[in-house]
C-alpha cells in the first residue's frame, strides 16, 4: 500500500458542494465534469500519479476515483475528500484480474483494515525479492488488505519483481553499504519532480527492510 498525504480539495469541488439547499443535495452519483475531473486530477497530483494501493503508475484514463470506505455503507463520506483516492484500473474498465479498488468493491473490514492515510501503512507490509507482498505474522489488518485488494496476484508480483531486480541485483546484494541503502530510500521516497514511477515505494520499503536487517547484524557483531 502507498501512503497518501492529503492536500486541499479543489476549490471548484468545494464550491459545487456548497450549492446544497433544501431542494438539491450534492452526491457523488451526480458529480460531473468539470468538477469531477478537477477532483480526479487533484487526487492524482497528491499521490504522485501512482495508485494508492499497489503503487503502479496511473493517469486519468487508467484510474478511477476510489472511496476507501464504500459509498453503500458510509453515505456520509460520499463526498468527503479524505475518503477519496485515485486507484488503478479505469472507471469504465472490466479488469481481469481485478485488483486494488475494483477488487475491494464494497468490501470493508471495519475492525481490521489499513488506510493509505495512516503514517505507518507502508511499513505494515513486507516484500520479497521475487515481488511477493506479505505481512508480519500477527498483522491481521495487513493480511486482510492484501486479500481484499488482491495485492498478491501474479500480475503485480511480476511487476514488483522486475522493479526490485533492477536495483537489488546479485552484485548489489553481495556488497552494499548502509549509506547506499539510505541513498536509495531518499531517492525513491522523494522524486525531484514529485512524480513517482511505478512501485517506487516498494523499492524504498525493500531498502528499509535491508537497512533494518543490516543495522541489527552490525549491532550483533559488536556484542
Image (tube, rainbow, N blue to C red):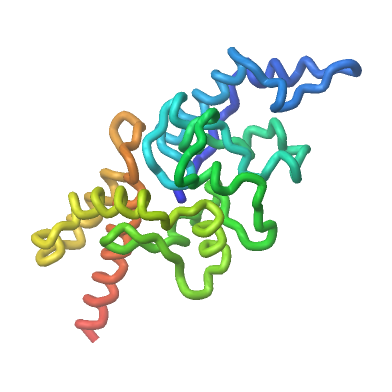
Identity of the residue furthest to the right in this view: 22
| Residue 5, x across and y down, in percent | 50, 40
State whether residue 65 is above or below residue 215: above
- Quarter location, residue 33: top right
Identity of the residue furthest to the bottom in this view: 223
In the image, taking residue 34 as reference, residue 135 lies left or right, namely left
Label count reads 0
| Residue 187, x across and y down, in percent | 26, 44
In the image, taking residue 152 as reference, residue 214 lies left or right, namely left
State whether residue 89 is above or below residue 210: above
| Residue 56, x across and y down, in percent | 38, 41
In the image, taking residue 58 as reference, residue 72 lies left or right, namely right
Identity of the residue furthest to the top in this view: 34
The quadrant of the image that shows the C terminus is bottom left
Residue at (9, 60) in percent of width and height: 171
- Quarter location, residue 173: bottom left
State whether residue 48 is above or below residue 132: above
In the image, taking residue 118 as reference, residue 127 lies left or right, namely left
Amino acid at each position: 500500500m502507498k501512503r497518501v498525504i492529503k492536500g486541499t480539495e479543489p476549490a471548484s469541488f468545494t464550491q459545487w458542494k456548497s450549492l446544497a439547499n433544501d431542494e438539491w443535495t450534492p452526491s457523488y452519483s451526480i458529480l460531473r465534469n468539470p468538477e469531477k475531473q478537477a477532483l480526479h486530477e487533484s487526487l492524482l497530483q497528491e499521490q504522485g500519479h501512482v495508485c494508492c494501493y499497489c503503487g503502479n503508475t496511473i493517469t486519468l484514463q487508467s484510474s478511477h476515483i476510489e472511496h476507501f470506505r464504500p459509498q453503500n455503507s458510509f453515505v456520509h463520506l460520499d463526498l468527503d475528500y479524505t475518503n477519496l483516492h485515485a486507484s488503478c484500473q479505469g472507471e469504465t474498465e472490466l479488469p481481469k484480474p481485478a485488483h486494488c479498488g475494483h477488487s475491494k468493491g464494497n468490501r470493508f473490514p471495519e475492525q481490521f483494515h489499513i488506510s493509505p492515510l495512516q503514517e505507518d501503512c507502508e511499513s505494515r507490509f513486507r516484500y520479497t525479492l521475487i515481488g511477493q507482498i506479505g505481512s508480519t505474522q500477527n498483522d491481521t489488518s495487513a493480511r486482510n488488505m492484501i486479500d481484499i485488494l488482491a495485492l498478491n496476484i501474479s500480475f503485480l508480483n511480476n511487476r514488483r519483481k522486475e522493479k526490485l531486480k533492477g536495483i537489488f541485483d546479485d552484485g548489489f546484494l553481495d556488497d552494499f553499504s548502509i549509506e547506499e541503502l539510505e541513498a536509495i530510500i531518499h531517492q525513491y521516497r522523494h522524486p525531484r519532480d514529485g512524480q513517482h514511477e511505478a512501485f517506487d515505494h516498494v523499492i524504498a520499503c525493500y531498502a528499509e527492510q535491508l537497512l533494518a536487517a543490516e543495522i541489527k547484524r552490525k549491532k550483533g557483531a559488536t556484542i
